[in-house]
Image: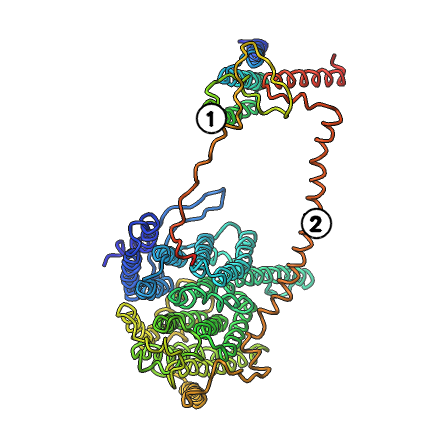
Amino acid sequence: MIPLTAYLSVASLLFTIGLIGFLTRRNVIILFLCVELMLQGVALNFVAFARYQGNVTGQVFTLMIFAVAACESAIALAFILLLYRFGKSLNISLWQSLHEPGLPVVPDQQPEEVVVLVDAMPKLPRAGIEPGFETEEG
Amino acid sequence: MSKDLLSHFLWIIPALNLFACLCITGLHRLLRTSAHLFTITAVAASAVLSTLILVHLYAEQSESKQLAYPLGSWLNIGSLTISLNLQADLLTAAMLFTINFVGAWIAIFSSAYMKDDPGFARYFAIMSLFIFCMCGLVLTTNLVILFVFWEGVGVCSYLLIGYWIYKRSAASAAFKAFLVTRLGDAGFILGILLMWFSFGSTFEYTELFSKVSQERTQLVREARPTLPINADADMSESDIAQARLNNFDANLLTICLLLLCGAFGKSAQFPFHVWLPDAMEGPTPVSALIHAATMVTAGVYLIARLTPLFVLSQTALLVVACIGAFTALLAALIALTQTDLKRILAYSTVSQLGYMFLALGAMDAKIGSLAVAAALFHLMTHAFFKALLFLSAGSIMHATANTIDIRLLGGLRRAMPITHIAFLIGALALAGIVPFSGFWSKDNILELMLERADHDQTKIAYVYYLLFGSAVLTAGLTALYIARAYFLTFWGRCRLPQEVSDHVHESSSWMVIPLIVLGLGATVAGVFGRYLNVFTDQFNTLWHVPHASSAHNEPHSPNYVLIISTTIISFAAILVAYFIYGRSSDALNVDEQPESGVLKDFSYNGFYIDAIYAAFIVGPLNLIAGASRVVEQALNGITTILVQLPKIMASILQVRALHNGFIQFYGVSMLLGTTIFIVFMLMMLRII
């Protein structure tokens, strides 16, 4: 029988690793993975406590977390793809242009040229097709 | 033909029409100009199949003339089961035949009428969907699925009335029709819910009827005072039982009245009749299909289907009869002075539907099934002659560049001989002239009313005599207004502008053939009346109508006094119309100010019912909406101020610098903040 503390230690370890990774790395995909690690640490807590107390609420909750995490990762990956397309880089420190106007750029260990996103904003494609019956409008 | 094969027809008929709709929707780009083939094929095949079903059911010797096809269940929740079963008894088969047969000819007519319309495919897709919904409505075995198709029919009607979407009047007419029928449907669904609440989760017709009937019989038995041995105790017990019976009856009455709301909404009875005349904004074949032959009959079908329920509540039936008679008279009076040919026909539809409701309302324990059969008979003949009248009007519009004002038409009988004969047959059938179909069904209803009034033993027998009188009066008015429309349109001098009148011509053969077929139908549909006793027999056995005496089922000798007097009234009305409108060709002139009188103004404006609704319902609602708008704007102003607060706070506290766009900085801030918060909470709770 593995004691509860063991599960909790693993969970907190996962959470901490995720947190440290999130705060120190600069690659967006790594950041994203770190966030997922933190999430799974919390989920593990739920399962452990649910098992310990002998009710399924925590496990059900974890299933919910999985579902939400799946949706969230789909959206996050889509964002990352789009950001990469505009900036041609995955370095998070390059995308500081969403700050309040007039603030200095936070310098990073590998100072690179900051891409100004506004210029690279996409042109939206034309949505839908032309209504078929122009003559009806007559 | 084997019964198995026939019961497969039950799902094939709606499936064909749904398939046609889906095909047109999916392939409309490919088949812009041949979409009608799908609709016509589907509905014509359905017409053949429904004819086979009708003939088979009629000829079958067994007691319960029924076909059934189980399609499984739609949902199962606890004790609640909604099945998707299909079944056809004679009532359903007659409805199916009417819908598909009349529908097929209207579809053929439409293919020529709508030929150059840009929305050709859309029109036929909706038409197929409509016929699918209507077939589903009559085939289902429970109230919930019926409600689903009921709404489907409403949606199709909305789409077809507003078919010319770029016309503002069509769009608002569609909106009005949808809202008014929705109002009735709200009552309908409340009735279904109340039924669920009172009788448990049985929506299947047969289960529902036997359950309600059993419960009531039980209550009646308990309430009947037995021989009092111990007088006091027995009296109090039977008092309680009597109170329970009264409670049950009141509940049943509420349910019936709520269901009636739905039926009145769909069938355009007072006070919901206002949508139908405006619905003439749609293409004319649509008016023929939906607003004359099939959709508006859904309300009649609903009450006919629920006969065993309604027969237990005489008050509800009295309401049906009174509203029916009142609507018939009101609509006939309005139709007298209308100048738009289609509106005259629309009001006459409302009026004839009133007749059907009057017949249904005459139902009681004694002549229950007879009343249903009479209403159904009138429904069928009406479908034929009204579709014929509308299609003739469509043919006229097609030939005269969409002129529909009868003051502008005139003298068309030489230019359009076939349309003229078709309209004449329809008009004679509507006016109830021997031997056209309308005569037999109308006479049937009048006789029924008289019989009902004669054998009524209660204090309110005079009400039935009044209803009978108003029905006879309405018959005379009907002959008068349709003769007026006929003479103004086809007799006298042509009043069309020169450039239009030069081009008046008989319509193409695809429009004329449906007119001929429906004209024959409107002439001979009266023969259905000979078979009515089969219907009444079946209704009695199927529905276990309490105390149904078989004495009334044998064909009784016709009431010749009544027949002769109504015929004289109709002929007199037609003669009056001839002398006023038929002889003098210059009777009317559009530019001329029509002589106005109080009565004429009332009639012409539909007794100002629309204006009354506008003043007493729409007006107050608009006021409330205006007030709500003011409140909302005030709230909106407050939010705008609130939104400024963070900005102001930020500029006071100088925290703008925190928002530097660097993700890790945000992460650290969150971590710190959360840690501080947790530590603080723990300290508050005195854990550390």
Q: Farthest left residue?
A: B1
In the depicted view, which residue is nearer to us: B138 or B222? B138
Q: Is residue A68 visible?
A: yes
Give amino acid for label 2. Val
Q: What x and y, as percent, mark residue B511?
A: 30, 69
Quickly name the residue at label 1. Answer: A82
Answer above or below: position of B29 versus B428.
Answer: above
Closest to the camera, between mark 1 and mark 2, is 1
- A7 to the left or right of B511: right
- Render colour scheme: rainbow
Please state the chain letter of the residue tagged with numbered disc 2 in the rendered image: B
Could you tell me residue B345's position as x and y percent? 44, 73
Q: Residues within 10 Å of mark 2 (few under 14, many from 20)?
A: few
The residue indicated by pointer 2 is B631
Left or right of residue B41: residue B459: right
The answer to whether mark 1 and mark 2 are in CB contact below 8 A is no
Q: Please state which amino acid type lies under the numbered disc 1.
A: Leu
Q: Is residue B551 above or below residue B588?
A: above
Expressed as whole percent of the image width and height from the top left, the position of residue A75 reads 49, 27
Q: Please tell me which residue is depicted at 38% across the width and 70% down the height of the picture.
A: B383
Residue B13: quadrant of the picture: bottom left
Q: What residue lies at 73% left-to-right and 23% top-to-bottom?
A: B654
Which secondary structure, mark 1?
A: helix
What's the chain of the residue with tag 1?
A
User: Residue A56's spot in the image, x, y percent?
Assistant: 55, 24
